[in-house]
Image: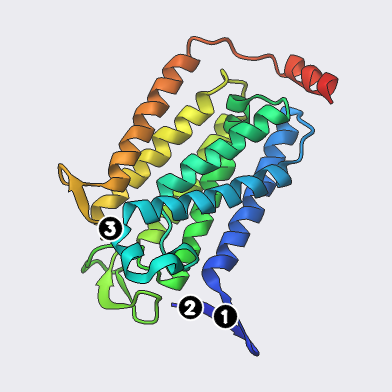
């Protein structure tokens, strides 16, 4: 594993580098979504704010979820390279997108629909950083041919384990591609977001069975409980969206141009 890239006297953390790449890719996909929808808004700025909010949320949720780590190392846990919770990042990131979509007069749900492919792909790419840094997000021991050890990781292990960040990378890219294709045709507002919540929640729920996270209730981890909520909310949103009419793309474009 390569937790750091060394350039003369500078040490560049690969986790941060992949996080930057995820943000850039997410901004590019978001910009493409805006262009396809005929929306003239600052996709890069919207993604940048959402990424920062997601990072803060992921760290805050991790601290609340693992208070023993805070008691052990104190406030240093807040800027430690390891320790980010997926659900906290999701909640804070969605909140940031909702606020910005409302301020830009795009609409909260429509903004989240447009951001869904970007969020899925960005999350997948961000997992490369977890893999390269060996920050402990790997899975349980396995004898499968692709199992690997992380002897030089931030949380090293000599045992061959599931490379779960690579599983999540694959899931994120596939989900993002699916949502992008689904977004080609007009759909009721909230539908794509609903699919995103269902698919990402299901993917995280399944991968948790082979991750090291402790079980807290009925043999499920905190992430699985949060993922279950995501799936339920996603299905409810799809059912609600099914009762709504499909927006007219040309009318939506004219409204945005009128606001601008």
Q: Upstream in the sequence, badge 2 or badge 3? A: 2
237, 84: nearer the viewer: 84
- Whether tag 2 and tag 1 are in contact, CB under 8 A, the answer is yes
Callout 3: 10 Å neighbours few (<14), some, many (20+)?
Answer: many
Q: What residue is disc 3 on?
A: 211
Viewer can see residue 138: no
In the picture, the disc for residue 2 is 2
The correct choice, above or below, for 196 with respect to 189 in the image is below
Q: Position of residue 203 (x, y in %)?
A: 36, 44
Q: Position of residue 255 (x, y in %)?
A: 78, 17
Relative to 137, is 176 on the left or the right?
Answer: right
Read off the residue under disc 1: 5
Residue in view at x 28 percent, y 51 percent: 208
Q: Position of residue 229 (x, y in %)?
A: 34, 33
Look at the image and tell me whether residue 199 can be seen. Answer: yes
Q: Residue furthest left?
A: 218
Q: Residue 96's image quarter?
A: top right
At 58% from the left and 32% from the top, the residue drawn is: 112
Task: Return the x and y of residue 133 as percentages of the image width and height.
Answer: 45, 72
167 to 75, vertically: above or below: above
For marks 3 and 1, give the CA distance: 27 Å
């Amino acid at each position: 594993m390569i937790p750091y890239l060394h350039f003369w006297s500078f040490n560049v953390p690969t986790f941060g580098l992949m996080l930057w790449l995820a943000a850039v890719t997410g901004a590019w996909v978001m910009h493409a979504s805006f262009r396809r929808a005929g929306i003239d808004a600052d996709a890069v700025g919207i993604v940048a704010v959402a990424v920062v909010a997601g990072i803060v949320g992921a760290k805050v949720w991790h601290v609340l979820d693992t208070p023993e780590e805070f008691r052990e190392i104190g406030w240093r846990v807040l800027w430690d390279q390891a320790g980010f919770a997926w659900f906290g990042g999701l909640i804070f990131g969605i909140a940031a997108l909702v606020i910005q979509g409302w301020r830009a007069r795009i609409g909260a749900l429509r903004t989240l629909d447009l951001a869904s492919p970007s969020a899925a792909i960005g999350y997948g790419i961000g997992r490369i950083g977890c893999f390269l840094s060996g920050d402990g997000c790997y899975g349980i021991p396995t004898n499968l041919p692709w199992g690997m050890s992380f002897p030089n990781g931030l949380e090293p292990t000599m045992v061959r384990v599931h490379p779960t960040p690579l599983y999540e990378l694959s899931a994120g890219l596939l989900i993002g591609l699916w949502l992008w294709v689904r977004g080609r045709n007009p759909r009721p507002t909230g539908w794509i977001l609903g699919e995103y919540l269902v698919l990402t929640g299901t993917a995280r729920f399944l991968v948790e069975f082979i991750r090291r996270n402790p079980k807290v209730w009925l043999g499920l981890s905190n992430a699985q409980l949060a993922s279950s909520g995501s799936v339920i909310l996603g299905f409810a949103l799809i059912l609600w969206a099914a009762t709504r009419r499909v927006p007219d793309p040309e009318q939506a474009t004219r409204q945005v141009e009128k606001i601008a």
